[in-house]
Image (spheres, helix red, strand yellow):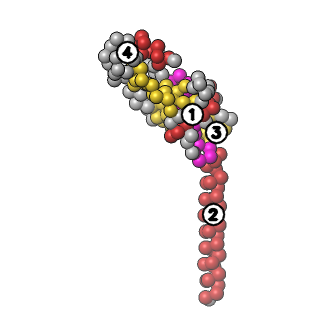
Amino acid sequence: RDYYNFFQQQYNGKEDTSVSLMDPVYSWSGGDFVINLVERSRINGLLLLTFSTKMYSLLNTVLPPGYGFCIIDNTGKVYIHSEAERSLKENFLDETDNAGLLKAAINSRQDATLSNVHCYGKEHTLFIHPLSQWLVMHPVARRSFFLVTFYENSYMAPANMRILVFSLLFTFLSMLLVILWLLLNH
């Protein structure tokens, strides 16, 4: 694993135990997507302490239809995706047809909202949020990480249409009742 090489090269023989890493990987034993939490061991003779977990809050999330999220680095590589089969297998910038706006948001390292971005074959609205610099997920290269949440725009149109139709219908029925009341009382 990359984190072993990182600790071997950077911290072998040093007493610093403050570095902790989070590295999403596919398990060699079962092939499952898991997240390894790694830190330098405080026990003499041991280099690393690792803990492998599925982190259900990230991997088996329950989201409304049309919604999703992913954690990407500044190159667009997807580390964790709400659809687990996409994790570590795609580049989010390659999935969008206009990656220029997304790259600009990533380079500025500020919160951004992008409307009408075509990705995964449909129009989406994206929210990009830079994650803290102290978060180290991939030890080989220092990278910036971003949380990208998105929703499919077509899911919002039917809801808005239902609200509009209900409002117009209620207004029309109210108007009919007022006219009927006026006609009966005169």
Residue that mark 1 sits on:
81
Looking at the rendered structure, the secondary structure element under dot 4 is loop
Q: Nearer the viewer, mark 4 or mark 3?
A: 4
Residue that mark 3 sits on:
123
Which residues make up the magenta segment?
Answer: 63-82
Looking at the rendered structure, the secondary structure element under dot 1 is strand
Check the image and report above or below for 70 versus 40: below
- Label 2 vs label 3: CA separation? 26 Å
Closest to the observer, 88 or 185: 88
The answer to which of marks 4 and 3 sits earlier in the sequence is: 4
- Label 4 vs label 3: CA separation? 54 Å
Circle 2: is it few (<14), some (14-19), or many (20+) Cα within 10 Å?
few
Q: Quadrant of residue 40?
A: top left
Is residue 90 located in the magenta-colored stretch of the structure?
A: no
The answer to which of marks 2 and 3 sits earlier in the sequence is: 3
The answer to which of marks 4 and 1 sits earlier in the sequence is: 4
Closest to the observer, 84 or 8: 8
The answer to which of marks 4 and 2 sits earlier in the sequence is: 4
- Label 1 vs label 2: CA separation? 36 Å
- Label 4 vs label 2: CA separation? 70 Å
At 54% from the left edge and 30% from the top edge, which residue is drawn?
34
At 64% from the left edge and 70% from the top edge, which residue is drawn?
172
Rendered location of residue 111, percent (x, y): 45, 35
Q: Nearer the viewer, mark 1 or mark 2?
A: 1
Residue that mark 2 sits on:
166
